[in-house]
Amino acid sequence: MLKNIPPITRGLIIINFVVFILSTYVLPPNISNYLGAYFPLSPNFRSWQIITHMFMHGGWMHIIFNMVALWSFGPPLERILDEKKFVILYFISGIGAFILFNAWNYYQYYELINMLKAQGVDLHEILQYSKLDDNGFFLQLNGTAGELQSFLLTPMVGASGALFGVIAAFTVIYPDAELIFLFIPFPIKAKILFPIIIVGSLFLGIRQSDGDNIAHFAHLGGALVGFILIKIWTYNRFRIN
């Protein structure tokens, strides 16, 4: 089955599964502390996490869902764009997801910082307690300090941001393609279904229900970058000089 998938999409699927298996069953359990993407002001942030987080996943359902999406939308897009543009689309969308997600995170971070300053809390001390040691351990804090600490200790993982860029580009090029989405028993055109998903992601991202650990703004960031890139490319392709 993989032989019929174009090379970049096939390579991404293989790499994602290899990294997932290694990080889950072979490498030390705290490998996500180094490869997941932390908030840039966290003491656990490293520059390479902007890329490596796209290859980390939180479980079998997470990676299977993402790789099925890549297998579904990647091949037709890779064939029409060419390999170079598809690679650019994928990774720039993933980086865009990281940027928008953390722009929203900064708003929350700023609110917590102001609350702690009003309480006279030593922020430097919280940062020190939020730094993971080589074994992934830290001294747990409570109250508002604990909220900030949790914020600084929670990494973003997954290829979803990059995939939302791919799906956004697919929707622009193939707006009338009929898609089956999860439990909806009938096909819906891409130009109808994807905007619904985007509006839902925006609503859920702003609402932020307790227990919701999905990075909705990462999805929006990836989709926005994918949409802009494909619009630029198609405009330049069909422009009359």
Image: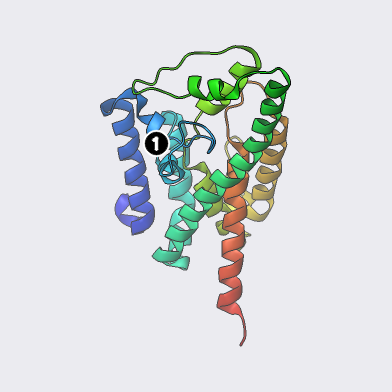
The quadrant in which the C terminus is found is bottom right
Disc 1 marks which residue?
35
So how many labels did they put on this image?
1
Secondary structure state at the residue bearing disc 1: helix
Foreground pick, 218 / 7:
218
Relative vertical location of residue 238 with respect to residue 5 in this rendering, above or below: below
Q: Could you say where residue 72 lies in the image, as x and y percent from the top left?
A: 47, 50
* Residue at far left of view: 26
Q: Could you say where residue 33 lies in the image, as x and y percent from the top left?
A: 40, 29
Foreground pick, 118 / 97:
118
Which scheme is used to colour this image of the protein?
A: rainbow
Foreground pick, 69 / 56:
56
Name the kind of residue labelled 1 in the image. Leu
Q: Could you say where residue 208 lies in the image, as x and y percent from the top left?
A: 68, 29
Residue found 33% across the figure and 51% down from its top: 11
Q: Could you say where residue 118 lies in the image, as x and y percent from the top left?
A: 73, 21
Relative vertical location of residue 138 with respect to residue 239 in this rendering, above or below: above
Q: Is residue 72 visible?
A: yes
Relative to 171, is 5 on the left or the right?
A: left
Choose top left, top right, bottom left or bottom right for residue 233. bottom right
Label 1, residues with CA under 10 Å away: few <14, some 14-19, many ≥20: many
Q: Is residue 179 visible?
A: no
* Residue at far bottom of view: 241
Residue found 41% across the figure and 65% down from its top: 84
Relative vertical location of residue 230 with respect to residue 68 in this rendering, above or below: below
Choose top left, top right, bottom left or bottom right for residue 199. top right
Foreground pick, 142 / 121:
121
